[in-house]
Image: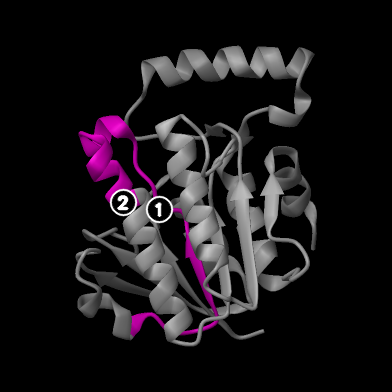
Amino acid sequence: MNLTANIVGATGLVGKQLVQLLLKNSNFKKVRIFVRKDSGLKHPKLEQHIVGFSNDKAWSKYLKGDVLFSALGTTLTQAGNKEAQYEVDFTFNLSFAKKAKENGIENYILVSSIGANSKSKVFYTRMKGELDEAVKKLGFNNITILRSPSLLGNRKTKRLLETIATSTIKLFTKIILKKYRPVRDVIVAQAMVNAATTPNSNKIIWDADEVFKLAEEI
């Protein structure tokens, strides 16, 4: 297919898995990542741009090709406050999506969150819902939004509360709500790859258990 992929959020939990899958995938001739510091990755297909996300003039001219993948996001703890988290999760994501559309990219794939709802009273799910609504209005030919459940994977920083919560969720969903069972990072990444290589213009939102199904589709 000779595709050129662009990735923002390439050093995160899902992003790292996505990069590796794309580098191994013969459908992609180039994998371009936008990062704020050196990822340390080396590969003949990889093109890295170290940029400040708030300065679109520094990266927008490089944002070209066939698809933009976004796995960009942070936590309230990492960001320090809600304003800083909103800048990363909403403002930066929307900025990349807008520039991608302006530059002729027509396939956009975003990792959102289970429960995303622009009307939610919960800050995080409201923020994610607002982003989902905003990018849907940009007019991409193909747009895929993965509202994945809790993520499992090897994080650099272990989060105690998240570990406890995930264990509880795994037990609860195994017994009662299988639909909302946690998902491994590589499964979400594979779903993103499948969404890019076999786009479905009739379906935009993929909820929780549907992410597993998309990861299995070839």
For the residues bearing labels 1 and 2, Cβ distance under 8 angstroms? yes
Q: Is residue 190 visible?
A: yes
What crowding class fits label 2: few (fewer than 14 Cα within 10 Å), some (14-19), or many (20 or more)?
Answer: some
Which label number is shown at residue 88?
2
Q: Is residue 42 visible?
A: no
Residue 180 location in percent, x, y? 69, 29
> Residue shown at 75%/30% (left/top)?
179
Cα separation between marks 1 and 2: 7 Å
Q: Nearer the viewer, residue 157 or 110?
A: 110
Q: Nearer the viewer, mark 1 or mark 2?
A: 2
Front-lying residue, 160 or 42: 160
Looking at the rendering, in which quadrant would you find the N terminus? bottom right
Residue 14 is situated, as x and y percent measured from the top left of the image, at: 49, 48
Q: Which mark is residue 159?
A: none
Mark 1: which amino acid? Leu
Q: Secondary structure at mark 2?
A: helix
Read off the residue under disc 1: 72
Please, which colouring scheme is shown?
one colour
Q: Secondary structure at mark 1?
A: loop
Q: Which residues are magenta?
A: 62-88
Q: Indicate whether 115 appears above or below 108.
A: above
Q: Residue at x 31, y 85 (%)?
A: 61
Q: Is residue 135 above or below residue 171?
A: below
Locate residue 206, reporting x and y percent: 70, 50
- x then y, percent, for residue 15: 46, 53
Please identify the quarter of the rendering in which residue 193 is found: bottom right
Circle 2: residue type = Val
